Amino acid sequence: MRVAVTGATGSIGRPLVEELAKRGHEVRALSRRSPTHPIDLETGEGLARALEGCATVVDASNAGPAEKAARSVLIEGGARLLAAAADAGVRHHVCISIVGCDLLPMPYYRVKVDQEQLVADSGVPHSIVRATQFHTLIAGLFEAASRFRVLPGGRALIQPVAPRQVAEVLAAVAEGSPLDGPETVVGPEVLELGAMARSWRAITGARGIVIPAPLPPKFGRPLKEGVLTDPDPDHQGTLGWAAWLGRSE
């Protein structure tokens, strides 16, 4: 099967391309800098040619976290992608979203909710897969903060998941028929952000004082209540936070 993956060089796009290829599919890795299938979601350039003959598209594109940048790629660019997919006769569009995005009133999460609705209203047969926060995202947050000798902590509950295990679920969904509703994929453990910061510091040897992340109550309260976690997911990864930090991906 010929599958196109947008955002193919990103934290989820790269392992997804590898997983699909491992399963024997012909994969078109779409990105701005692709040597074979360059595209630009913000202009639509290259989309028609890149999607020609593709049975499935997995949209792993991303932008942000600023709302304007996210909306430009995920909503306006997403609409161009869906239109091109319809013109190309694509039979399955897979959208990657976030567990709890409809429950946390943050600008980037509102964009993800709008992206889900855009896909649902497009008329293109589709599936939506919601994942919890990737290990790479949290590690990147800590690494950036550690340059200032501080690490964001607090009691926000996170259920981090390995990108490669999300990629395995996405590949399986891409191979199948469009889903009736969203499916979720989560990590094996629910952890407080502060505990994750301390283990990251211990395992990496980085320096930094762990301090509670300053969040207004409308964000902090739902995060402490676990809105970004799922106690009854459709798919659950097996690689925990500390184990992931101790290996190379």
Image (spheres, grey):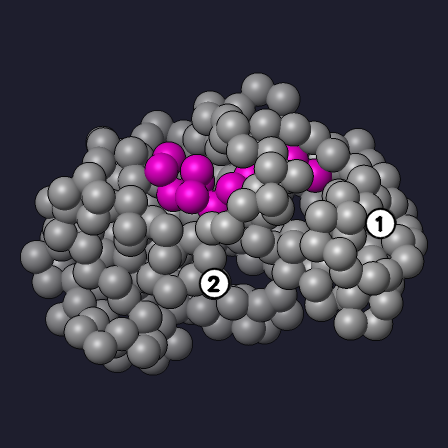
Query: Is label 1 in a helix, a strand or a loop?
Result: strand
- Res. 238 visible in picture: yes
Against 217, is 35 above or below?
below
Front-most of residues 113 and 165: 165
* Amino acid type shown at disc 1: Gly
Number of residues whose C-alpha sits closer than 10 Å to that of mark 1, classed few (under 14), some (14–19) or many (20 or more): many
Query: Is label 2 in a helix, a strand or a loop?
Result: loop
Which mark, residue 62?
Answer: 2
Against 204, is 174 above or below?
above
Residue range in magenta is 158-169
The residue at the far left in this view is 53
Which mark, residue 153?
Answer: 1
Q: Position of residue 43 (x, y in %)?
A: 34, 80
Front-most of residues 176 and 114: 176
- Res. 126 visible in picture: no
Q: Residue at x 29, y 34 (%)?
A: 172
Give the mark count: 2
